[in-house]
Amino acid sequence: MARTALAAPIMLALILGTATAAGTALAFLTDPVSAQSVSSRSAEWPKTDFSKHSVDLGEIRSGGPPKDGIPSIDNPKFISASAERELSAQEPVISLNVAGDARAYPLRILMWHEIVNDTVGGVPLAITYCPLCNSGLVFKRSVGGKVLDFGTTGRLRNSDLVMYDRQTESWWQQFTGTAIVGEMTGTRLESVPVRIEAFERFAAHNPAGKVLVPNNPDIRAYGRNPYSGYDGLSRPFLYSGSMPENIEPMARVVAVTVAGKPQAVALELVRGGGPVEIGDVVISWEAGQNSALDASEIAKGRDIGNVVAQRHGENGLEDIVYDVTFAFAFNAFYPDAPIRTE
């Protein structure tokens, strides 16, 4: 289904649950942070030190929603995997296990909230998901002995979620976990290895594991995809930067770090045969996971499969930090990094 950037306000209206969001979303085209007056910035962000920034403020644009317009989940509610009845078998979840505490965070919920502030196995974590980049990453929230709580700024950079911490109101790039504006500029959050997998895979290995459920099931259309058809577009919404040369911008890639440097492999290459190896990293694929950004109902999304990225360690293969994102997003943040397609 063909769409243009003018469809973005409709999607944002669905996310916010308000008709006014449609008009507000058009601000993206004209509202870089650098163009805002000092007084207007200070009114909304009294703690943020805009004199400190590691990126051009003109690169940060309004995505439509205001500060916390897409509300983070700060008091997450869980049920056991064996008791979960709403999720279909192949719906995608972000799964993790910290000190034996196994939890799954369905994208049907993260789609509408983007951030969950949680503590897993005694470790404060931020579980994050940016639909426009299809980027699902988890970070430790402890920095310098202080536990940070994260929310959404309503801004985007390279079409990626810009978060903020409520303690200093510094702004953080979700794709890299790095503070780009404010007191914490230059600080990088520690990433945690997770899997983006079908719910049935998590439940099979963790029947007593916990699954995130909505605090209020009626507040959003959980299970619906407000970005219907997004991953079938030829070009992304809300992005005007350069595109990768050797792959379609909306093609999925598996992003990993090899020898301290970011690299990516086309998902089509990974699913085309056996495991793909890059240095000491092994990337494997199995069928059976719905795309969260395809059909209007997530459970009916096309099969994009399950990816596992691991590294050879002393005890065999060990999970590593990875992401299954869109090629344009990886290229935007790592323009000099290779994307392997064959």
Image: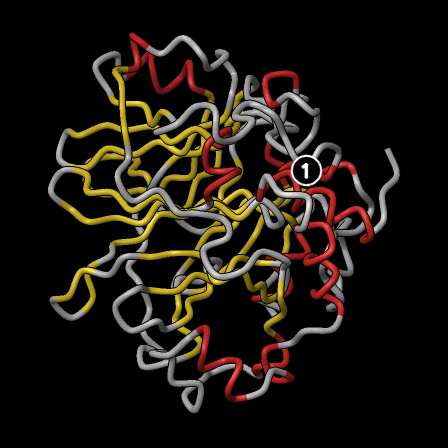
Q: Residue at x 35, y 71 (%)?
A: 169
Identify the secondary structure beneath mark 1.
loop
Total count of labels: 1
Describe residue 278's horizontal placement relative to residue 121 as left or right: right
Query: Residue at horizontal 65%, vertical 46%?
Result: 12
Which quadrant is home to the C terminus?
Answer: top right
Amino acid of disc 1: Tyr
Q: Residue at x 44, y 39 (%)?
A: 282
Q: Position of residue 221 (x, y in %)?
A: 56, 26
Does residue 40 appear in this view? yes
User: Which residue occupies the foreground of this view, 201 or 158?
Assistant: 158
Between 136 and 256, the residue placed more toward the observer is 136
Question: Which quadrant of the figure has residue 195?
Answer: top left
Q: Is residue 311 visible?
A: no
Locate residue 109 relative to residue 228 in the image: left or right. Answer: left
Quarter of the image containing the N terminus? top right
Q: Name the residue rendered at 50%, 87% in the picture.
A: 39
Please identify the quarter of the rendering in which residue 165 is found: bottom left
Report the side of 78 relative to 121 (left or right): right
Q: Is residue 39 above or below residue 190?
A: below
Where is residue 3, by image quadrant? top right
* 50 lies above or below 190: below
Q: Position of residue 156 (x, y in %)?
A: 58, 63
Instruction: Specify the farthest residue to the right.
Output: 2
178 vs 109, nearest the viewer: 109
Q: Nearer the viewer, residue 130 or 284?
A: 130
Q: Which residue is mark 1?
A: 227
Residue 145 image position (x, y, % from top left): 11, 67
Q: Position of residue 138 (x, y in %)?
A: 35, 48
